[in-house]
Image (spheres, rainbow, N blue to C red):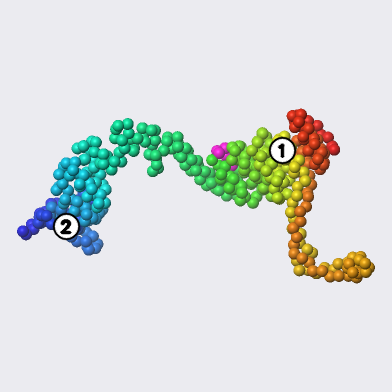
Amino acid sequence: MKPRLVLCGTAAVWMGLLGLDLKAEVFLLQNGGRLEGELLNPDQSPRTMYLIRTLEGAQIGLEARRVAQVLRRRPVELEYEKIKPTYPDTVEGQWALAQWCLEHNLLTQRREHLQRIIQLDPNHAEARRSLGYMQTDGAWKTREEIMTSRGYQWFRGEWRLPQEIELLQEKEAQQSAQREWFAKVKLWRGWLGTNKEEAAIKNFESIQDPAAVRAVAAFLEDEPNPAVRKLYLGILARINTPDAVKQLALRALEDPVEEVRLTSLDYLKTERRPDVVALFISKLKSKDNKMVRRAAVGLAAMKDPTAVGPLIDALITIHTYRIDPPGGPNAMSATFGKGPGGAGAPGGGTGMSFGGGPKMVKVPVQNQEVLDALAKITGVNYQFNVPAWKSWYAQQRKTQQPPSGDARRG
């Protein structure tokens, strides 16, 4: 049979032979239409026209501008289209076709046939289970129906309770707000020292959002200017959330500038803060004597009676120090002494010795800041007489009386 040409608008159509063994592509059209067939001019470049032989055997020419996308169909999909009409519309026929689809990984088509099976036989157990149904209380239900009946919702790829979804959304909103604050603090910090400094300070002094704590803490950590660090401390004090208070406490311990540390304490001591007191108490056991003394200054500011016992234990602390020999580890030194032979070495005279390496020595240290804190909190003072302090404290606990507050020098 000789193909004949049919003209339809801008499309040229040739009627060809039917029933050809075709390759096939799916042509998605700009107007939303869809056409299936074999592309006859795959090598055309630049593309101006798609010459297509449809599954029915007709040949069509489409201008390239009319085609939005071309999808290639697999040979197994074409085979499916051929064999589909040969299976009867019965439970047995549709089940056999569904199994064929499973073997050839045509899962979308398989689902269609499983759906048809349960239309024909609502109690077909294998089809139901293949579609994800479970039998609950004598009825077939999908997992979605079961989870929904239990109050769950599908959210971000998982079944979650509404409360969990709400918490996740709140967390995401908080993270978004934190990112915004990082940008704002960075911008305003850049204004300091410029003609926008007054506006920057005004903006900083207006911050009260808890979401800003993370950004302020990060910039505080890296800020070299003590005056700016004090500005950041004021923000944290206004916000006054547990996270903000923790940053104030850490700055009271770790800032290298005493004025900044004392500014932090001024903000902290305005109210009772058990968590801060607990942090300071833990630092009394630090190997770093500097940290012990700073913690004591903090406890003196907080005036919390629960710190008395730990402070007594920290009156005198043992710290390890490295001692380097004079002149370095390989230096020689002369020794002079009086021995049986007279002045000089043990045998008399003088002697020479080679210096050894550095030595680690343990040294007891009396911590004046700890004593000051004890005197301020208790109103008594036994100096560095640890047994006297412990005796007094045991008596106080025995009588369950708080420190008197009357200063007394021991």
Which of the 4 image quadrants contains residue 348? bottom right
When asked about the image quadrant of residue 230, the answer is: top right
Amino acid at pointer 2: Leu
Report the front residue among 137 and 169: 137
What residue would you read off at disc 2?
Answer: 22
* Residue bearing the label numbered 1: 307
Residue 44 place in picture, x, y as percent: 22, 62
Q: Is residue 403 above or below residue 295?
A: above
Which span is picked out in magenta?
203-210
Q: Residue at x 22, y 54 (%)?
A: 76
Q: Is residue 109 left or right of residue 365?
A: left
Q: Is residue 111 left or right of residue 158?
A: left
Q: Is residue 243 left or right of residue 118?
A: right
Q: Is residue 317 visible?
A: yes
Residue at x 83% of width, y 35% of height: 408
Q: 281 and 189: which one is in front?
A: 281
Residue 375 rendering spot, x and y as whole percentages: 78, 37
**136 and 344: which one is in front?**
136
Q: Give the SS element for disc 2.
A: loop
Mark 2 and mark 1 lie on one chain; the one further toward the N terminus is 2
Is there any visible trace of residue 13 in the rendered image?
no
x then y, percent, for residue 126: 26, 41
User: What residue lies at 22% left-to-right and 63% top-to-bottom?
Assistant: 43
Task: Judge whether residue 207 is colored magenta.
Answer: yes
